[in-house]
Amino acid sequence: MKNAEISTIYSTPDLAGKSHAYAEGHSMQLPRHITEYHAAISAERNDSLMLTSNLQSRLHIFLARAFGVKRVIDVGLFVGYSAMVWAHAVGPDGLVTGLEISDEYERVARNAFVTRGINNVQTVVGDAGKSIPTLVSETPYDAVFLDANKEAYPDYLAQLLSLSKPESKQRLLRPGALIIADNVLRWGHIPDPSLTTSYWASEELKNKELEGLRRFNDTCAADPRLEVVMLPVWDGVSLIRLLD
């Protein structure tokens, strides 16, 4: 007997595609500058696989508005698409802080913001593990989007928690803050390690990335300060709430 908890609605890839398109057509619409930027990057760059989907971005906007998010840390800026989405979600009086290790990606992102008149994104170039502690202030952030080095997810999480202690007068995240972690299933390799793809340059890199994601997922599920729902959609997305 099939597990009743597992959806079998998409019996064919064609039906899955039609259902996805239908869902997009019955969800909030994204501004044209966001969808056009996604389309341009998808057409022009070989690394566009790293883009978040337009439909997932609608979820981010919905969550930001539902949680009253006005300040977001975007860990893994890439070419700026996700930060552009968050900038729209928080509004012109909000703030998005994008962390990016690559000078090239940050330049592309910053140019995209300037040419589109987006003024509520600040960028920080460097290792996110070193940048995150510098963001602690008297005005904590409301949300974090993790979409950078998968091997470092456990370290990012440890920093987010240690810098947001309940008794601290200055903390990184406010009580009840939202953490969204992308790619937590990694094309199904997390639940099924026997899968193989050509994405990774070496088995060593693959194993380090998957081990980091497994440790991150296990830590999130076990930590009493966190309330987690992992969604088996896209490449796996965990929605995490800081309980204190």
Image: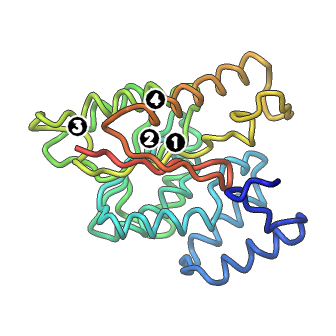
User: Distance between the Cα atoms at labels 2 and 1?
Assistant: 6 Å
The crowd level at tag 1 (other Cα within 10 Å; few <14, some 14-19, many 20+) is many
Left or right: where 131 falls relative to 22? left
Q: In the image shown, does 38 or 193 lie closer to the viewer?
A: 193
**Label 2 belongs to which residue?**
99
User: Distance between the Cα atoms at labels 2 and 4?
Assistant: 23 Å
Q: Position of residue 214 (x, y in %)?
A: 59, 28
Left or right: where 229 falls relative to 241? right
The crowd level at tag 3 (other Cα within 10 Å; few <14, some 14-19, many 20+) is some
Q: Residue furthest front?
A: 1
Q: Residue at x 36, y 51 (%)?
A: 178
Q: Residue at x 27, y 49 (%)?
A: 141
User: Distance between the Cα atoms at labels 3 and 4?
Assistant: 23 Å
Q: Which mark is residue 172?
A: none
Q: Residue at x 74, y 59 (%)?
A: 42
**Label 3 belongs to which residue?**
136
User: Distance between the Cα atoms at labels 3 and 2?
Assistant: 14 Å
Q: Earlier in the sequence, mark 4 or mark 1?
A: 1
Of labels 4 and 1, the one closer to you: 4
Q: Amino acid at mark 2?
A: Leu
User: Distance between the Cα atoms at labels 3 and 1?
Assistant: 18 Å
**Label 1 belongs to which residue?**
76
**Label 4 belongs to which residue?**
219
Left or right: where 110 falls relative to 121? right
